[in-house]
Amino acid sequence: MQFASRLARPAVMALSWTFCAVVFLWSHSLSAADEGGETLAERACDMTHTTADRLAALTSLIDSHLQDREKWLLVVVTGADDEIAATATNALLLSENKELSRVMSSRYPKLTRQYQAVVLSSVRHFLADVSWRSIVRTWVDTIVQDVRSLRPEDSLCVNFAGLILSESRDPGDFTRLCALVQRYPNVSGPWLGLASGGELPNAIQGLATHVYEGVDRAPMTRLAAAIAVAPMDPQAAAFVREQIESVLSSIGGLSIDRILAESSNVGGTDQSGPRRVDMQTLQRTVSLAGLVRYLHTNAAHEYMMLFLHAKNEYVRAVGELLLALRWPDELVGADLPPEVTPEEHDNMVGAIVFLHPELRGDVEGRYGTDAVSALLDRVRKAGLGGTFGYAARAVIGG
């Protein structure tokens, strides 16, 4: 998603500014804490108030313990400007509101593309339920018919739409993903969506080969296309292996502390050791590792285990989240690599129960009911992003 993330900056910066403003307005919001939900919702929607006042009202509503809090947040989603509505949507996704997708189905097409991308990013990040797919389907059916050139905000939406549809087994969604990669071959999300859908049509296989062999394309796009076609193309599988080995050789042996130390050392470093890696390069490289989630060859498990043995905490966290997502049975009774710390082990236990509730009995049988309940509660409160840091973004997207 390097291509998409580079183009995503306006939307991501907009959402970041929203949350910064919310924090800045904390003290302002306290003065409104005693107001009712209806009053706060009205003020958040009223364009005659300043942006600061509307954000303060929304913050008070989000942080309130009102019984009808979510009802009035839905009103904000419907009636506020795009920035306020997107922030309210984020709060409702966090609380797993079941009415949100129904309300958003009529609001979403009216959002600017920038905030459509913000909403899809949140939907993907919070692993929202399948009811959101109908909104994505409608949007995809429209965008593939758009004859205009690809705009940055379009690219970001296409990327997240592909990731959201990656979980679907609906033949219609497979067709949509094929249409997206033909219309937007340089966006990684739809390629990753196709990677989970079985054998690709010959035309799409040929396009995937053309994309991953294109040295002028973004590394994320090339790897995504190769992952999509790897089960059918040994050369693509070899390309994937080359990229994963490159990830491990470049950052796998470097701890975060060492990277930070070397990044702050402007005077140079030991030329006999690994080359310097700054944090931006680290994140881009970890994002490549996260794409293993979508790889459906026998090598995927091998790569996960290699990540677990890494000294780099980001790479190791990618392996831990991959295990929790795709191979949860292996944690119970498994001997983990010595590099995995006790805290990281606990994170995996909590994530497995969070992602796979049906395994809770087995996990409790190994670790105890009280311990598992505490770990699950910790993951619920922090979210996967708070638990696994940047690795969650790399593996899940959003």
Image (tube, grey):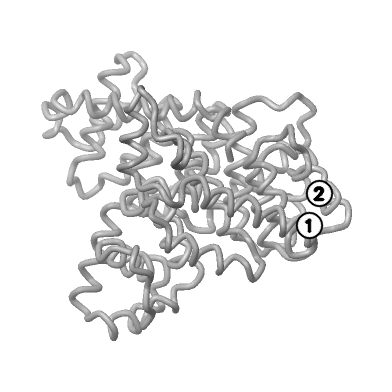
Residue shown at 11%/34% (left/top)? 34
Residue shown at 30%/15% (left/top)? 49
Q: Nearer the viewer, residue 103 or 184?
A: 184
Q: Nearer the viewer, residue 49 or 165?
A: 165
Residue under label 1, please give it. Answer: 235
Image position, residue 364 (x, y; %): 28, 81
Residue shown at 73%/60% (left/top)? 230
Quadrant housing the N terminus? top right
- Say whether marks 2 and 1 touch (CB < 8 Å): yes
Disc number for residue 209 = 2
Let me know if residue 133 appears in the view: no
Image position, residue 64 (x, y; %): 19, 41
Q: Earlier in the sequence, mark 2 or mark 1?
A: 2
Let me know if residue 225 appears in the view: yes
Q: Nearer the viewer, residue 259 or 28?
A: 259
Is 6 on the left-hand or right-hand side of 368? right
Residue shown at 37%/80% (left/top)? 332
Is 358 on the left-hand or right-hand side of 230? left
**In the image, residue 107 above or below residue 166:** above
User: Is disc 2 surrounded by few (<14), some (14 to 19) or many (20+) residues within 10 Å?
Assistant: some
Helix, strand or loop under label 1: helix
Q: Which kind of residue does numbered mark 2 sit on?
A: Thr
Helix, strand or loop under label 2: helix
User: Is disc 1 surrounded by few (<14), some (14 to 19) or many (20+) residues within 10 Å?
Assistant: some
Pair 2/1: label in front: 1
Q: Image quarter for residue 353? A: bottom left
